[in-house]
Image (cartoon, helix red, strand yellow):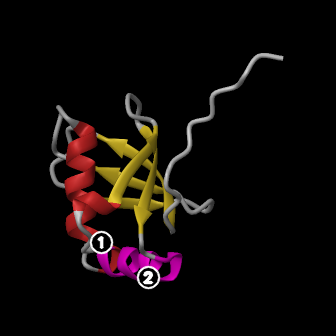
Amino acid sequence: MASRKFHFHHGRHGTVLMIRVTAHASRNGITETQPDGSLCVSLTSAVENNSALVAFLSDTLSVAPSQIELVAGEGGAEKLVSILDVDKEEIQRLIDNAWNRR
């Protein structure tokens, strides 16, 4: 049997969000929350959607950009994002606050 190479990473605690991004919007914001818990986010940026999303989430959720990790969907509209070191209840509170400020 051939030796398998495993790639380990430091497991940090946090919350994972499913986000659908729409570009070319008139303003940045959370536009919808889905029944499955995913978020629809509109961004004014047409280029660099990933960095624009990180900046938006950092500002909206009051977390450092280094706490936001794009787990999947780098090239598409649907993204899986991990917010490190913040529990799901706090993320939910912050999203609710952002939603109510719209």
Image: 66 above or below 102: above
The answer to whether residue 71 of the structure is visible from this angle is: yes
Q: Looking at this view, is 1 or 83 the one in front?
A: 1
What residue sits right under mark 2 in the picture? 90
Q: Amino acid at mark 2?
A: Glu
User: Residues in magenta?
Assistant: 87-98
For disc 1, the marked residue is 61
User: What is the three-letter code of the residue carrying label 1?
Assistant: Leu
Which quadrant of the rendered structure holds the N terminus?
top right
From the viewer's perspective, tell me whether residue 91 is left or right of residue 7.
left
Side (left or right) of 41 relative to 90: left
Which SS class for mark 1? helix
Q: Residues within 10 Å of mark 2 (few under 14, many from 20)?
A: few
Identify the residue at horizontal 51%, vertical 60% (top origin): 16
Residue 102 found in image quarter: bottom left
Q: Which mark is residue 82?
A: none
Tell me which numbered mark, 1 or 2, is placed earlier along the sequence. 1
Quote the CA–CA distance across marks 1 and 2.
9 Å
